Amino acid sequence: MKSKIALVTGASSGIGEATANRLTTAGFKVYGTSRRGAPAGRRAYEMLPLDVTSDASVQAVVETVMGLEGRIDVLVNNAGFGVAPAGAEESSVEQAQTIFDTNFFGVLRMTRAVLPHMRAQSSGRVINIGSVLGFLPMPYGALYAATKHAIEGYSESLDHELRNWGIRSVVIEPAYTKTPFDANLLEPDATLDAYREARAAMSAHIQKVMAGAEGPDVVAGTVLKAAQAQRPKLRYTAGGLAARLRLLRTFAPAGVMDAGMRKDLRLA
């Protein structure tokens, strides 16, 4: 049988790279993307340049893959970045718009560009890399959590709209994942002295937790499961911590979750 075609955004490192490798090993023909592309021959999959904040760039990469393969079976929306720990009011509106433009509207652009082709072939799977922060709050990470909450709502709503064409929309929910993600954190552009100590404490806490976090292969394995499932679920947690947090969020009383989070993050 001819290999299924997968398009993975943000595939130059971290979760995107691990996902592209896992899908390739499983027999998919994978096209990865990054802002700069990558030299030929360095990876088991082809890399294409893509800026998910540009309508023209998104259309160009989808047209390239369609021209080469004639179909796209799986879209993995992974490209994104975060803001370094900061109070919500320490980022300007312009900075908030910047992070949404990549983390949410980038997903929207890619999905809109691919869906006409998936509808024409009456099949396809849109897999969005979300986060446990799509169903949990993140003090001093409000903007990033807001983008992931948006992806949750978008993915589930989209799934109901697309099932009649044999297309499914899925969201993957990892917890802390050990990747170079923190190398691309956007520093807050409106810092306030009132949050200085909290910023430092939160940064130290996250660094400590990340040191023992699961690697991106855990997320990649979950993406593969979602891509191959005959009847995919709306949501897949990725890793042990994510599964425990989803269980707690579902069954624990709100007050218990609130107190537990504040204790864990030392927000007393």
Image (tube, rainbow, N blue to C red):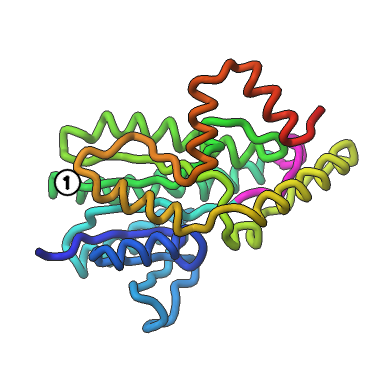
> Which residue occupies 48% across, 46% down?
239
The quadrant of the picture occupied by the C terminus is top right
| Percent of width and height locating residue 262 | 73, 29
Q: Residue at x 19, y 66 (%)?
A: 69
Q: Along the horizontal axis of the image, is 164 left or right of 96? A: left
- Of all residues, the one furthest to the left in this rendering is 1
Tell which of 88 and 56 is nearer to you: 88
Q: What is the span of residues highlighted in magenta in the rendered image? A: 82-92
What residue is rendered at 49% in x and 66% in y? 35
Q: Is residue 101 above or below residue 47?
A: above
Q: Is residue 90 magenta?
A: yes
Q: Image quarter for residue 255?
A: top right
What is the secondary structure assignment of the residue under circle 1?
Answer: loop
Of residues 59 and 252, the one nearer the viewer is 252
Tell me if 64 is positioned left or right of 16 in this view: left
Amino acid carrying mark 1 in the image = Ser
Location of the N terminus (image quadrant): bottom left
Q: Position of residue 152 (x, y in %)?
A: 44, 34
x%, y% of residue 173? 46, 41
Q: Note whether 217 is above or below 87 in the view shown.
A: below
- Give the residue drawn at x 41%, y 56%: 220
Foreground residue, 29 or 151?
29
| In the image, farthest residue toward the right | 193
Tell me if residue 204 comes above or below residue 5 in the rendering. Answer: above
Q: Is residue 251 left or right of residue 8?
A: right
Location of mark 1 (residue): 123
Dominant SS in magenta? loop
Residue 199 magenta-highlighted = no
